[in-house]
Image (cartoon, rainbow, N blue to C red):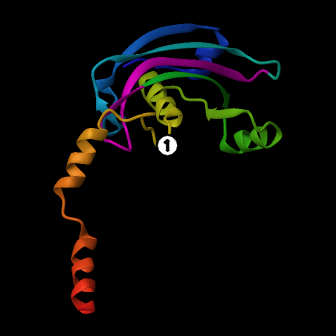
Amino acid sequence: MTVIHSAEFAQEGRELKGSIPLTQLSRLSDLLADASGEVFWHIESGVDKLQRPWLYLEVKGTLQLICQRCLLGAPWQLHSETVLTQFVTEEQIDEAEALDEDLDGILIDPELDIEALVEDEILLTLPVALSHDVCGGDDALAKLASDKPNPFAALAQLKTRKAE
């Protein structure tokens, strides 16, 4: 686990890179068809012209998400870049975000867990309902559907009996 003091890290203009195995991202695991592989992260920092510390976070990787149509794995390219401006209080974040709707604010954290920050960013970036353009599992879905009796077939039989 990589932990930094977010404001000190930014004021020193430091930079870190690393990777995280997908198996270590517990909040993400239910959304993955396959948890093999890893994501790569890069964090840079500095202070803006208003003397606010900031963190630039980039996250990359290929995730095997679950297709919402066929429920099989679907590869998805993750590439997220964000700048997080740091503030002392929530009120300061609210004021700054009211003035600049593109600003992403976070609280200064003396023990910022980079892996948790990366996982948060991944969860915010995921598509709402990923699906293949053309599902490879369409044949399996058709077979599954043909194995089930049609619930309207019984109604059709009742209708024809009534007509007799």
Q: Indicate whether 91 appears above or below 134.
A: below
Question: What residue range appears in magenta?
Answer: 51-75
Give the image location of residue 127, x and y in percent: 50, 37
Provide the secondary structure element on which disc 1 rests: loop
Judge the density around disc 1: few (<14), some (14-19), many (≥20) Cα neighbours within 10 Å.
Answer: few
Left or right of 137: which side holds 39? Answer: right
Magenta stretch encompasses residue 123: no
Left or right of 158: which side holds 25? Answer: right
> What kind of residue is marked 1?
Val
Q: Nearer the viewer, residue 19 or 144?
A: 144
Furthest residue toward front: 164
Residue drawn at x 44%, y 29% is: 119
State which quadrant residue 158 falls in.
Answer: bottom left
State which quadrant residue 137 falls in.
Answer: top left
Residue drawn at x 58%, y 14% is: 9
Q: Indicate whether 33 appears above or below 152.
A: above
User: Dominant secondary structure of the magenta stretch?
Assistant: strand
State which quadrant residue 30 falls in.
Answer: top left
Give the image location of residue 136, x and y in percent: 32, 32
Give the image location of residue 12, x and y in percent: 64, 9
Residue drawn at x 16%, y 55% is: 147
Left or right of 122: which side holds 10? Answer: right
Magenta stretch encompasses residue 55: yes
Q: Indicate whether 89 appears above or below 3.
A: below
Give the image location of residue 108, x and y in percent: 60, 30
Locate the N terminus by quadrant.
top left
Q: Nearer the viewer, residue 44 or 61?
A: 61
Locate the C terminus by quadrant.
bottom left
Q: Dot 1 corresponds to which residue?
A: 128
Residue drawn at x 69%, y 21% is: 53
